[in-house]
Amino acid sequence: MAGLLDRIAPDVRRRLAFGLLVYVVTTAVFALVAGPQRLGEHTSFNHYAHLADAWAHGRQYIVHGGPSYAMGNDFAEFQGKTYISFPPFPAVLMLPFVKLAGSPENFQDGQFMVWLAGLGPTFLFLVLEKLRRTGRSLRSEGENIFLSALFGFGTLYFFTAVEGTVWYAAHVVCVFLSALYILCALDAERPFLAGVLLGCIFMTRPTVLLTGLFFGLEAIRVSCKHIPEEGTLLERARMTWAELDVAALLRRLVPFVVPILATLALASWMNYARFGEMSPTAFGHEHLTVVWHNRMSQWGLFGYHYLAKNLGVMLTVLPFTPPKGNMCFVGNGGLLEAITKFSDCVPFKINEHGLALWFTCPFYFWLFRPKNKGLFHACILATALVPLAVNLLYQNSGWRQFGYRFSNDYAVYLFVLLAIGGRPLGRAFKSLAVWAVAWNLFGAVTFDRGQFDKFYFREATQRELYQPD
C-alpha cells in the first residue's frame, strides 16, 4: 500500500486527501442531520428499492401494487400492473444491496443516499481543482474547499441529501454523476467515459442529458487549430469551422455518442416492454395515479402552459407571515403556558412549492457580473441554461420541497461559473453564504419532519403559490 502511494504524485495525493476530507465532513453532517430514523429504517417512498427488488426477481413490475406505507404515491398503473415510472439508474446502484438485504423493507435506502450524498461536493472540489490547475480558474485551493462546502450546506442540495426518498434520491445521484461528467468532459479528455456518465445521467434525470452540449463544445474547441477571439458571433463561428480538424472531432465525438445511443436504446426497450411505447423518454409518468393526472393528459409533460407557474415558484415564493391579528404573544400565565403557546405558533410558514432560489441561495447574484468572461465561461453558461429552461416547462414545479430543488440539475455548473467568474469572495459574498447555510440548514432539519410540519403550508391540488388574503 505504501509503495502504491509513493507512485502517486504529491500534488495528486494532496488533492485526493482534501477530497476525502470534503467527503468525510459533508457525509458526517448529512448523517447527523438525517437522524437515527432516516438512517436506521427504510423511507416511506422507497420506490427505487422496489424497482431493484423487481429486477432481482426477473420482472419490471411491482407484485401486489405499491406498498401500503407509500399510500399509492407516484406509482404508474398500466394494464393491471404497477410500475416505477422514475428513470431507473439509482435502482441500479441499489440492486446488489437490496438483493443482499432480501427485501426493500430490509434495505435502508435513506442511509444509502446519505453515503452517496457526500460524493457531490467531493467531485465538485476535484472539478474546481482541475480548473485551477489548467488555468481556467484563479481560485485558491482554500477557496475551492469553501465553495465545495457551500455547495453541500448552502444550496438546496442540503435538504435534498438528507431526504432519502425517491424524488430527492435522483438529485443526489445526478449531482455526483454531473461532477464526474465535467471532469471527463473538460478538454474532451475522456470521451467514452463522459458518454457513459451522460447515459447514466439520462437514466436518472432525463433533462440533464442536454448538458451533453458541454462535451460537444469542448470537443470542437480542442479539435480546432486556432480559436478566433475577435469578430461577431457569426464571423467567429465561420472561422472556427474553417480551422476545425473534422477527423479529430469525430475521434472524440464517436466514442462519446456510442454509449449514449446504447443507453437510449436500452431505455426504449424497457419502456416498450412495460408500456408498449418505443421511446427512450416514455418512462410512464403519464400513467401515474395522482390528482394532477388530468393536467398531464391535457397539457402534456412539458409545455409553455407551465412556464408562468414554474417561474413564480423559482423566483417569487417567500415565507408567509401571520396575519396582523394572529401574531404570537405570550401572556402572564407562567412558564408552562408560555412554552405551550410558543410551541403552537410559528413566526412564518413556507409553502411546499418551495422558497425562491434567490432567497435560499442569494450568493448566486455573483453570477451576473463575472470579472472574467470568455469562450469557456460562455460554454458553461449555455450548458447550465439548457436544463434550467427545460425544467421551467415541466408539468411539476418540484412540489413538495423546501426550495426550488430542480436547481440541483445545474447547480454544479453554477458553481463552476462562480469559480471561473473571478469575482472576489469577500465579506458581502460570505455574509450571503452564511444566510444561505442558515436557511438551508433550517430546511434540512425541518422539511418532511412531522414535528415541524407547523412551519409548512401544504395545499394538495398544488394551485396555491402565495399566502391567501
Image (cartoon, grey):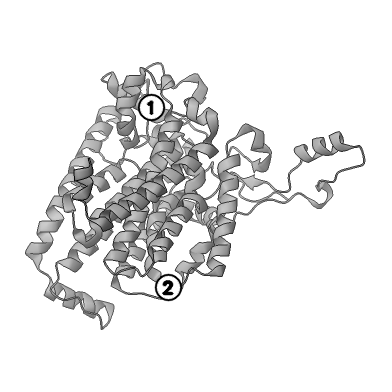
| Front residue (pair 437, 61) | 437
Q: Give the residue drawn at x 54%, y 39%.
A: 33
Residue bearing the label numbered 2: 370
Task: Look at the picture and state if 84 lies above or below 371.
Answer: above
Residue bearing the label numbered 1: 49
Q: Residue furthest right?
A: 332
Task: Look at the picture and state if 451 lies above or below 423.
Answer: above
Amino acid at the residue labelled 1: Ala
Amino acid at the residue labelled 2: Pro
| Front residue (pair 319, 76) | 319
| Front residue (pair 298, 38) | 38
| Front residue (pair 306, 256) | 256
Q: Residues within 10 Å of mark 1 (few under 14, many from 20)?
A: many
Q: Give the residue drawn at x 51%, y 53%.
A: 154
Asked which secondary structure carries label 2, the reply is loop
Q: Locate residue 183, reporting x and y percent.
A: 27, 55
